[in-house]
Image (spheres, rainbow, N blue to C red):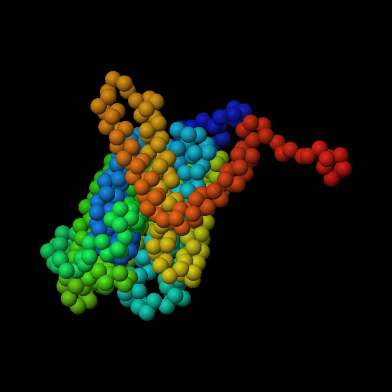
Amino acid sequence: MSNDTHIEQGRTSSPTPPDPGPAQPRRFGLPTATALVVGTVIGTGVFALPSALAPYGPISLVAFVLVTAGALALALTLGALSKRVPGSGGPYVYARDAFGDFGGFLNAWSYWITAWAGNAAIVVAWVGYVEVFWNSHHAKGWSIVIAMIGLWIPALVNLSGVRNFAIAQTVTTVVKFIPLLFMATVGLLFIKAHNFGAFNAGGTSAGSAVSAAAAIALFSYLGIETASVAAGRVRDPKRNVARATVLGTIGCAIVYILGTVTVFGTVSNAALQKSTAPFTDSANAIFGGHWAGNAVAIAAIVSGIGALVGWTLIVAEMPQAAARDRLFPARFGTDSRRGTPAFGIVVSTVLASILTVVSYTRFDKVFVTIVLLTVVTAVIPYIFSAAAQLYWLLTRGKATNWPHLIRDAAVSAIALVFSFWSLAGSGYQAVYFGVFCLFLGIPVYIWMKIGRREYGESVVIPAELTQTGE
């Protein structure tokens, strides 16, 4: 895996230390990179999303359209940044390139939290579809056991090597996309208007409902940046990362919006608010019986595993890029003999497991609680990425090509506004916990900066201690 192109300032040693990773890592091309984007974006979140949006009513579809426009602007921005800085790390390397070490570290730290906390949210939704077949009474003890299986199987797939990862990611993406595409096309023919219920079911103002629904809907698009995060493992990243990001986002957007409309129009709003497997309920309503719903549940299970396989790689990629710049503990920066960031995978899966257990034992609305925390920590790297693109456009844009400059700046500005809007809609509690988690990284940053000794720092011993002989 190639390092990013940054030169650490202030270092006095002349030779560059050897890359701790393999000399020539196995890389994957555009199809797998696109499958990575689609596979991580379309997890089990989309399968649980209609139930999470149901309390707001059909007005949440307006939020979904607005979020989709913002996600596309963000995808275009990330694609442009990947051409400028093609190394692994995505938002981390973009922020470090534009704003220095501290900006880069905050992105790596925040995104790392997003990835392993997001895995906890994905596995919670995944459990709901497994329980269509087993533990249908939702006993918490068994739910936790199922969740642990869902977290650790993808970890083992990743630990076994990049080749197995690529196979699993591609196969699960194809399997999940077909039934979702079916629901988003044929399913539209079975919509009944009375199932939608009140347009603004929450009873709040339209603006508040749209903002709150948008914060939840944004979770569905987390992952559009994954090709850029794993750019060091992609062949010809300057070309393929941008294409995979945009193509993957467009494909997901079509399936998302139309699929959610189908579920809203085939399952009553009251039933949808109580559902743990809304796409299964929708398929049963369309075809009658349980066979169709069971087929969708199987697709959701495969989809969840595929998403977790992708995210389990991504959860270790950004810390690895930061570790190789000596901004994360060194253990995160190494690859195993099979060419995978094994230490980051194991540590992150352990943290996701702990969060999942705590969520099941402490919170009633497990999925929504974790989703909102994850959205807050994900929006921070999005804000930095959009700001980095605006910074480079405004300082190094070509004055002779004003139409392109204005277009690119407008897209980046939309991505920036979209990110702030999503942050505002997450709610006070989610922002509180998200900011708290972000600031927990500052002591880690101080520790890593001291360890680098790039300016000749040394530990200062107070004079009074040396005088007393202590």
The percent coordinates of residue 81 (x first, y second) are 36, 36
Q: x, y (%) of residue 340?
A: 46, 50
Question: Could you tell whether 240 is left or right of 142 in the image?
Answer: left
x 72%, y 39%: residue? 459
Q: How many marks?
A: 0
Q: Residue at x 37, y 34 (%)?
A: 389
Where is residue 159 drawn, in percent x and y? 46, 56
Quadrant where the C terminus lies?
top right
Q: Residue at x 70, y 36 (%)?
A: 458
Residue at image position (51%, 59%) is 351
Q: Is residue 394 above or below residue 49?
A: above
Would residue 434 be found to the left or right of residue 71 on screen? right
User: Do we see residue 228 in this rendering?
Assistant: yes
Q: Residue furthest bottom?
A: 137
Please state the horizontal and vertical placement of residue 304, each as a whole percent of the image.
Answer: 34, 62
In terms of depth relative to the viewer, which is nearer, 11 or 32? Answer: 11
Q: Residue furthest right?
A: 468
Left or right of 326? Residue 178 is: left
Query: Which residue occupies the extreme top position in the image?
Result: 400
Quadrant position of residue 87: top left
The answer to which image quadrant residue 261 occupies is: bottom left
| For residue 86, above or below residue 281 | above
Is 323 placed above or below 302 here?
above
Res. 157 visible in picture: no
The quadrant of the rendering that contains the N terminus is top left
